[in-house]
Amino acid sequence: MVRNKILVTGTAGFIGFHLVRKLLERGDEVVGLDSINDYYDVRLKFDRLAETGIKINDDSASWNRLIQSEKYPNYRFIRLNLEDRDELEELFSEEKFDNVCHLAAQAGVRYSLKNPDAYISANIVGFINILECCRHHGVKALSYASSSSVYGLNETQPFCTSHNVDHPVSLYAASKKSNELMAHTYSHIFNLPTTGLRFFTVYGPWGRPDMALFIFTKAILEGRPINVFNYGEMKRDFTYVDDIIDGVVRVIDNPARENNLWSAKTPDPGSSKAPYKIYNIGNSSPVRLMDFIEALESKLGRKAEKNMMPLQAGDVHATYADVSDLTADLGYKPSVDVVTGIGRFIDWYRDYYQIKKQEK
């Protein structure tokens, strides 16, 4: 029995791929959407899709048409640009989704320093198109990816959704904060339940090659030095992907509701008198970067050669998620420690790239 019909955007991406598998395994009908941009190696994105039974190539024939999964009868995929309003409208009109989980975005803090236009197109134009389609096509609730980067210059730890987030330090962070503001407008005016998810340093199998764990692992195995920024004096709330997916599914199943205690005189930024909510999703247990590297070295059985470097533009010194409201409201409880999580990633990495070698 099908539970819900859900559109998940960003399904060739790291979190979207894992979310699709979870939803399919429990019986939801899912349509996945992704543009498969070349921000990082598209082969990894196509391989993620293949794991869910979507066999397509990087050619013009793969665009703007629904493709049936060869593995899951309740899964179809469409390659589509979020900026293409007409194609997106047609998809919503034909499919009549119950829920939308919007994870697609132009990712990366440092890349936003080099290519700002990509963030406006994907994260701002793409997001307004999603909001408009939800509004006009009877979607019951929207959940969407925000980011811990919105906390910017805030140094109050742990980061809480009641904190001010008006001082971003990258355009990526500013685009995610903009999404939260845009979502509130649609919740307020059109009564569309929206929930923003501030992810904290997600890692795990099938992860992104531009993230630290992937970069460090590849370099250490190849005998190359790793760049350790801020001279290693950084902390990150590394969160294993299975814990993230557990939180996302709980949010999908529990759309935002009005906060009847919300006061316009002392406004809580994380909720509203409209059906609007912001949650942190993290491990709530920050790890020193050097401790993270040591755990990686232990699993690999190799020492890393380290280039100690200053903090990069757009980076923050520490992230630490207060997830108490997600725990209280929806029973979220992360359970995978960083040593276990790194071990699972390394096992996947060795297996995946050994297979890729054999395919050459």
Image (tube, rainbow, N blue to C red):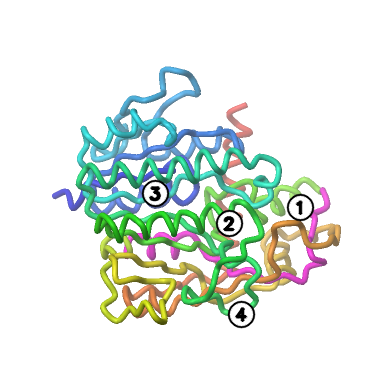
Gap in angstroms between the C-alphas marked 2 and 3: 17 Å
Q: Position of residue 329 (x, y in %)?
A: 32, 76
**Drawn side of residue 350 relative to residue 244, left or right:** right
> What label sits on residue 173 in the rendered view?
2
**Of the numbered discs in the image, which one, if any, rests on residue 102?**
3
**C-alpha distance separating marks 4 and 1:** 34 Å
Q: Nearer the viewer, mark 2 or mark 3?
A: 2
| Type of amino acid at the residue the image marks with label 3 | His
Q: Earlier in the sequence, mark 3 or mark 1?
A: 3
Who comes first in sequence, dot 4 or dot 1? 4
Image vertical order of residue 180 relative to residue 55, above or below: below
Secondary-structure class at tag 3: strand
Judge by depth and name the residue closer to the eye, 338 or 104.
104
Q: What residue do we see at 29% from left, 48% from top? A: 24
Which quarter of the figure has residue 81?
A: top left
Crowd tier of the residue under label 1, counting other residues whose Cα lies within 10 Å: few below 14, some 14–19, many 20 or above: many
- Indicate the secondary structure of the residue bearing disc 1: helix
* Residue at the disc numbered 1: 220
For the residues bearing labels 4 and 1, Cβ distance under 8 angstroms: no
Q: Earlier in the sequence, mark 4 or mark 3?
A: 3
Mark closest to the chain's N terminus, 2 or 3: 3
Q: Secondary structure at mark 2?
A: helix
